[in-house]
Amino acid sequence: MSSATPRPTPEKEPVPKLRRLPLAGVLRVGRPSNIWFKPAFSVVAAVAPPNLILVALGRLDLAVYTMAGSLCALYAHNRPYAARAKALAGVVLGMVGGLAVALVAASLTDDAVILVGIGALLAAVQKVVCDVTRIGPPGNVILTFVSSASLFVPQTLGQVPGHVALALVAGVWSWLVGMAPALVRPHGPERRATADALNATAAYVDTGGTGDGHARARASAYAAVQAAWQCLLLTGSRSAATRRALERLVVRAEIALAAPSDADPARLRAQAAELRGTGRVPGSDAPRSEADELLGVAAERALPPRSPWSRLGPLAPIALRTALGCGLAGYASLALGVGRPYWALTTAAALYQANITLTWSRTVQRVVGNLVGVLIFAAVAPIAGLGPLALVLCCLVFNFGAEALIGRNYWLGSVCVTPLALLVTEFPGYQATGSLVADRVVDTLVGAMVGFAAALAVTNRRAGNRVATALTTVGLRREHAARLLAAPQTGPTALETARRGLAAALVDLRAAADAAAGEWWLRTLPQERVVLAEQAGHRTLAAMVRRQGLTAGTGEETNRSAGTGTPPGGGSGTGPDVGTGEDANGDTGDDTEDARP
């Protein structure tokens, strides 16, 4: 027997593994957005007047420029009106700026190779800016479609100012359309966001915190609550009274999330229903003073906002995927002799999502929707060919249909977007239906295959690092909360701020874990650490709720001895709920199911 001391075997790094790309459920039709009608009616109201005026003037060929500004009406419907005004102005400037760059390039060169390269770079910039500013749907796709198509419109340098001015005028009209509902329901977006938070919370409360699907329902509810806070934090100072009333309701939703067994889901849903219309905001069923309840919110408002440009780093792989995929798709289309490479470029740009799994799903949806859409276009083309007015009316129908259906599944929206895009090409003059259909089918398939191949080639290895960072943040905020719970003299401001900070960190952790889990080529994720961190974080949130002396649905407040912070049922507020393995409902924390929001 050897007398040498055995050396420990070094631990091997986990080997990157391939992840399966799903097919089941990719085309499943879901429920529509609760505000699907707003972008649908808004885009019709924004598109119709400019196009009908051009029909009356006999200059429908100029509609390709007014459409650029009119499509801005699709954006920012989920934002309070004070923030929407700025966001829509930014979208209009971004749209007109991209159009101007494209038209200038088209007037200076007709070299398709150069134009495709410019289009790919524009697509990457538009993707990054939309993701950084979190402008929301439809994101960069509309901007990229307009700018890439404009690169191939015959143009002279002298015509550019007039065409850009047309887009700007239509963009101003879109801004007015987007802001018009403020005259009727000035607090509509924040009321809807609060109602969504209450309804999502009620769905989680229905599970009792331990029933079937409780992890998924909890993640969805926390995401809805976080979205409500983000919406309320964007509300202007003129709405202070309404904002405070809505903030109380979101606080009650947070409390119900932390202690679902004490909450009444029927009451949460009733409060959500009362937020419809313009009536009085319902009370929050909490006899606490306004100062105590909203101290944490006020503290958050006092913090300087985080610069959106701090989010640039994680977007580098997405930007590279977009530039590479769009460029290669356009060049592949040129190599095949297709006369409209911007369709392949736009198809590639529409694919790129937060991770490879979502990008794959979008690829399948895009291909199916476009192929069905070209068939619909072939059927509708004879009707649209009856005259300019018929063409405009068909476009309006497809504009409405796209926004009405896209919330159910992206492929359904593409079924309407595809014939709409094909009809727009006929604004300058009639195009042969057969060649349009053939070109669109080829460009769709080329753009999807080349674009997805580029996504596979450009791996996002930073996704795992973001999970580690999010885990660290949750751990630090949970430790901070535990220290506050252990201190008998902790004030309500510190407790509210710490509770809100921990809740936000848990939402960020789930988003980072979901994004990383969908990458095709990635080292094994610390799934167990993520689950344990989420469990411990939620137990700490429950302990903080009881330390603050809150109940979730009865309207009765537990005894809060001044300066003692005694939780319901006695104890110090730092008992078994903080990191021991049991949450407020006796749950042992077996949250092993997929908890995607």
Image (cartoon, rainbow, N blue to C red):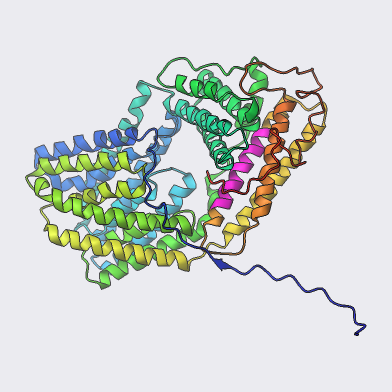
Q: Residue at x 61, y 54 (%)?
A: 466
The residues colored magenta run 499-514
**Residue that sits furthest to the right in the current view:** 3
Q: Position of residue 75 (x, y in %)?
A: 37, 39
Identify which residue, 61 or 453, lies in the foreground: 453
Can I make out residue 198 in this image? yes
Quarter location, residue 165: top left
Image position of 25 with respect to 317: above or below: above
Quarter location, residue 263: top right
Magenta portion: prevailing SS class: helix
Q: Residue at x 38, y 50 (%)?
A: 140
Image position of 80 with respect to 287: above or below: below
Q: Position of residue 124 (x, y in %)?
A: 41, 57
**Residue that sits furthest to the front in the current view:** 212
Q: Residue at x 91, y 85 (%)?
A: 1
Q: Position of residue 148 (x, y in %)?
A: 30, 57
From the viewer's perspective, is 42 left or right of 528? left
**Residue that sits furthest to the left in the current view:** 386
From the viewer's perspective, is 387 left or right of 353? left
From the viewer's perspective, is 469 left or right of 84? right
Q: Position of residue 81 (x, y in %)?
A: 42, 29
Is 284 colored magenta in this rendering? no
From the viewer's perspective, is 456 left or right of 483? left
Can I make out residue 234 in this image? no
Is 511 colored magenta in this rendering? yes
Quarter location, residue 244: top right
Identify which residue, 227 or 254, lies in the foreground: 254
Image position of 428 with respect to 543: above or below: below
